[in-house]
Structure formats: C-alpha cells, structure tokens
Amino acid sequence: MKPAAGGMDRMHPLTPLVKGVRSFWFVIAAISWQGFQQLGLTRGAMIVAAFGVLGLVWSWIGWYVTGYQVTDGELRIADGVLTRSRRTIPVARLQAVDVVRPLLARLLGLAELRLEVAGGSKTEAPLSYLTLHRARDLRRELLAASRPEAAAKDDGTEDAEPPAATPLVSVPARRLIAAQLITPQILFLPIAAAVTVWLFAIDPDLSVLGLAGVITAVAGILFQPVKEAFVNYGFTGSVTDDGLRIRHGLFEQRQQTLPLRRVTAVTIRTPLLWRPAGWVRAHVASAAYSTTNAGAEAFSGRSLLPVGTREEAAVITAAVLPGADIDGLVYRGLPRRAKWRVPLQWRFFGVCLTDDYYAVRSGRFSPSEAFIPYGRILSVRVTQGRWQRLLALATVHVDLAGGMSVSSAARHRPLSEAVPLARDLVRRSQETRRVPG
C-alpha cells in the first residue's frame, strides 16, 4: 500500500467503507419519516443512495490524504480535504490509549485508537481505522514512549486478561437487563403503547409512514435504557499493573485502562427504582479523560459499576482508592435548623474526613456519595446564600482536578463548622501534594 504524503502511514484501505456507510444513516435521519411521506419511497431512496455514494467518495478522499507517524517522541497526524492540518502530539502527554471496535469495524477485523491527552478538552486525534493487530502494536508503541515502565508490562494480549488481572466485578447480563427494565423510560412504555394504539384508533386512515413516525418517537424515549444495556453488556472491571481495566460493549466493544494515579473521585448512587433490589451505580471521575467526551464513554462520569450490589461497589472502590471503606464511615450530619432550608433531606446530608480522602453524601430518594482523594482537591470555597445567612449555614465547595463535574460540595453546614472544614481540606490537600511519590 502506498504511504501518504511525507512518508506517513495510512489507515486501513477499508476505512472509507466504514466511515462512508454512516452517510446513508445521516441522510435517512435528515429526511425523516415525514420527508419520505412527502417525497415518496422511490424518490427518497434515490436521494439516500445519491448522498450515500457522495459520502463514500468523500470518505475515500479523506482516507487518501490522511496519514500518521510516530517519530522523535511525537505522534504526527496530517489530514483535511479542503483545509489541510498537521497535528503534533507529544506522546509524553498521553494519559490513556483506548481500543474501540464498532460493530462494522469488528466485522471487518478493524479497530480504532482513541487518545486522551493531558489538558485536552476532547478525545484527541482518534486513529480510525487500523487492523486489530496494528492497533495493539501502535498502542504498545505509544505506551512505550509515554510510560516505558507500563509498556514493559504490556504483554500485547489485549483480548486475554493477564494472570494478575482477575476481574473484581463482573455484571451478569440478566442483572443488567433487569436494571434497565425498572427505569422510568421502560415503565413509561405501556403508556406510550396505549397512546400509539389510541392515535391509530381515532384515525384509521393514518398511513404506514405516519404510524412509523409515532413509533419512532416512542423509540426515542426508550433509547437511553437500551443504549445503557448495549454499552455495558459484558462489563468487567479489574485492576492491573497499568491501572483499572474496563471491558464492555455488545455491538461496539471497548477496552480501556484508567491510570489509578489520575483518579479524581468515585461516586456511588442508588436510583430510587433500584432500592428494593439493593442495587447501586458507581462512577469514577478521572483527569485522564476529557469532560466533553464523558457522556458516551465508559469512564464517563465513567462507569465503575453500571449496576451491582453495595458489596461489589465497596470492593471496586477500595481497589481504585486504596484504603477506602465506604461502609465504615461515620458522617457528620446537619443541625436541626437546616430543615428550614432542606425540609425533606436534611437528615441525609453528611460529611466525613478520613486519613486519605474526603467523603460527602446527600439525597433522600436517590442517595449519592462521593469519595475524593485530598491530592485531587484544587481549591476550596465557602459560600452563603440568603436563606443560609439567616440560619447561620454555609456551603463548602470543593473544586477538583480536571474540571470534573462531581457533587463534592458539603451543603448547609453550620457556619462555625464550614470555615474550619474548608481550612482543614486545604491543609490536607497541601500536605498530600508534598508527600514524595
């Protein structure tokens, strides 16, 4: 295969096919069912085919002018059709290199590398698509340049767990599906189905395309729980020498490794509808992953445990935050006067400081807890609202490394406690950063 300009390597020749197929779906979504009804199926299909072919041609041109190269401790990428760009990424800044395999790419034996760079606002320069073997080799090459000690321990068998990587948590498919069946969207399904039948009953002349539009709207409501089940299918979490290794996905398989030194916080939440079953959901926030990419990824506000028992959450949390004992904490609650500010929840707020991390809890109907290492605290603020001033209360805000969105504030604390608490957190944070290593 002829290399790209400048002696760079090209992506796999089937890359235009994988990317170009998306064009068909984009055009179908843009036309919508109403558009097909107005244009007619034949004309609509011709438009989809025409734009789909254009998409394939455009993808081929993009593939032809795109190249990458690892040299002199840098990853260099050249791309762009109308506007050419050349990016140079120092591999020393790489925080994580993930292997992602969408369904069509998997069927063709391809994979995508997604790179997270320190200080980046999004996933940087995804390399798509490469053969699975090449993706693994390139991942090891990048790790070797960024963390030689980590790459030396990478045996290259991405599909097989190393002997030391015994899964700490594994989510059975039955539990994952059951958890999604008791979400608000699924419980709304009978109402949505009844509305669809009612619409058809009052208007028997409703066309097939019109009925399809109604069904599509209902499907949109159910999209999130179905997506959660697909994304987290086969979820396993284990701790390796490199960090926390997460594997999951039914149609799009993902293999991600989170460096433990980059963990910012762990949160555990008990959704209201899961409480009778005793299930919780755990997430990990990490400075290794961009916040704009957090919504769709497994480390996104990232799943540490999509659904599991409290005991499983305790095990995986202790592995990510060594020494953490989430069930052995004694929280300091709020004074009785705080019920005038939060009448239904004041008994459920609490804060606890251990030797290694800061913990805060809140919520009556869907309780949540956050556990934050002192070394990840960037700043601490004390604020007072109008009603808090009348009640001599204050909120201690904790800002975290990486700009992560975590409910880390100690809300409605007595003013006499809030200021000393803030000073204590600042002191512990500074002392932790001064500790060697």
Image: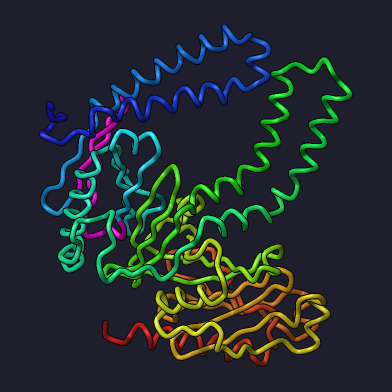
Based on the displayed image, in which of its 4 quarters is residue 41 positioned? top right
Quadrant including the C terminus: bottom left
Q: Residue 227 in the image: state x and y as whole percent.
A: 55, 46
Question: In the visual, does 363 lie left or right of 41?
Answer: right
Farthest residue to the front: give it. 174
Image coordinates of residue 186 in percent, x first then y, are: 70, 48
Front position in the image: 391 or 270: 270
Specify start and end residues of the magenta stretch as a single range: 75-96
Q: In the visual, does 296 lie left or right of 167?
A: right
User: Which residue is located at x 51 percent, y 47 percent?
Assistant: 230
| Residue 34 in magenta stretch | no
Which residue is at 71% across, 62% downward? 273
Identified at 27% across, 85% down, the residue is 436
Q: Nearer the viewer, residue 170 or 46?
A: 170
Residue toward you, 190 or 64:
190
- The residue at 46%/75% (across/down) is 317
Please give left or right for residue 232 compared with residue 421 in the image: left
Above or below, comparing residue 137 to residue 56 in the picture:
below
Q: How is the image coloured?
A: rainbow
